[in-house]
Image (tube, helix red, strand yellow):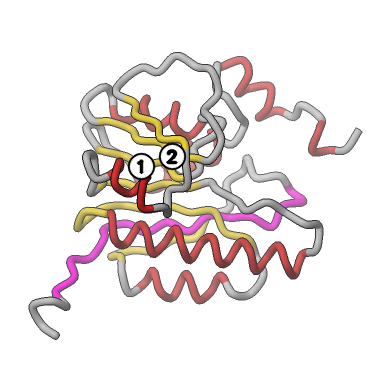
Amino acid sequence: MSNRSKPDFYTQKAKKEGYMARSVYKLEEIQNKTKLIKPGDTVLDIGASPGSWTQYCLKLIKGKGCVVGADLKPLGNFKAKGTLHFIQGDVFSGEVRGSLSQWGPFDVIVSDAAPSTTGNRLIDTRRSYNLIEQILDFALEWLKPGGNFTVKVFQGGDETEIFDRMRGEFSQVKKLKPKAVRKESFEYYLIGLGRLQQDREQNP
C-alpha cells in the first residue's frame, strides 16, 4: 500500500467531520490565513468534484450568498447547507459560461483542479500550467473588482509567470503550501486578494 492510499490524519478527519475529501483542510488553512471568503459572498468553485471545497465554501458564506460549483464529474453525495448550484460540464465551454452568467460575476473564485496525469513530469507540468492559465484567464474575466482568487499550482518553473501576472491584477498575491498537502507533493496555492479595477477601456 502506498503512502497516498493510506488513510492519514487529514483523511480520517475529513471522514469524521463529513467532508468529501481531505483537500478541504487546504482551503481551511488558506481561509484562516487570508480571509478569502466572507459571509454573503457569491463563490465559484472550478473543478468542484467531489465537493469538499464546495462544502466548506457553503459553511463560510453562512447562508447569505451562494456557491456555484462546476466540474466534468458529478459532486459527491452530501447534504448542502445553504444555496448551492452545480453545473456538470466544461467550465470553459460556451454552454457552461452561459449558465454561469445568471450568478456571476463572482466575489470569490477558487480552484483545486488538476489535469489528468501521464506519469511524465514534464508533460504533466505543462498540462498543469496550461490549465492554470485558463483558470486565471477565466477568473480575471468573472471576478468582481475587489474579488479574491486561489488556484492550485505545481512547482516546475513556469508557475512564476502566473505569479508575476497575478501581481499586476490583484492588490496582494501570496504563495502557500498548506500543511494538508502531502509531503511528497509538488503542489502549492497562489492566492490573489483584491482584484484591481481595470480602466483599459476608458484609457486605451
Q: Residue furthest right?
A: 1
Q: Is residue 186 left or right of residue 98?
A: right
Q: Is residue 90 magenta?
A: no
Q: Characterize the local packing of mark 1: few (<14), some (14-19) or many (20 or more) Cα atoms within 10 angstroms.
A: many
Q: CA distance from mark 2 to mark 1?
A: 8 Å
Q: Which residue is mark 2?
A: 70
Question: Decide: marks 2, 1 in contact (CB < 8 A)?
Answer: yes
What's the mark number on residue 88? none
Q: Position of residue 11 (x, y in %)?
A: 68, 27
| Residue at the image position 54 percent from the left and 34 percent from the top | 49
Q: Nearer the viewer, residue 59 or 112?
A: 112
Q: Nearer the viewer, residue 14 or 105?
A: 105
Q: Position of residue 134 (x, y in %)?
A: 46, 62
Q: Is residue 192 magenta?
A: yes
Q: Position of residue 175 (x, y in %)?
A: 50, 60
Q: Position of residue 164 (x, y in %)?
A: 44, 75
Q: Characterize the local packing of mark 2: few (<14), some (14-19) or many (20 or more) Cα atoms within 10 angstroms.
A: many
Q: Which quarter shows the N terminus?
A: top right
| Residue at the image position 51 percent from the left and 61 percent from the top | 132
| Residue at the image position 51 percent from the left and 30 percent from the top | 51
* Range covered by the magenta-colored residues: 183-199
Q: Residue furthest left?
A: 202
Q: Secondary structure at mark 1?
A: strand
| Residue at the image position 34 percent from the left and 26 percent from the top | 84
Mark 2 or mark 1: whose residue is earlier in sequence: 1
**Type of amino acid under label 2:** Ala
Q: Nearer the viewer, mark 2 or mark 1?
A: 2
Q: Quadrant of residue 138?
A: bottom left
Q: Which residue is mark 1?
A: 44
Q: Nearer the viewer, residue 191 or 50?
A: 50
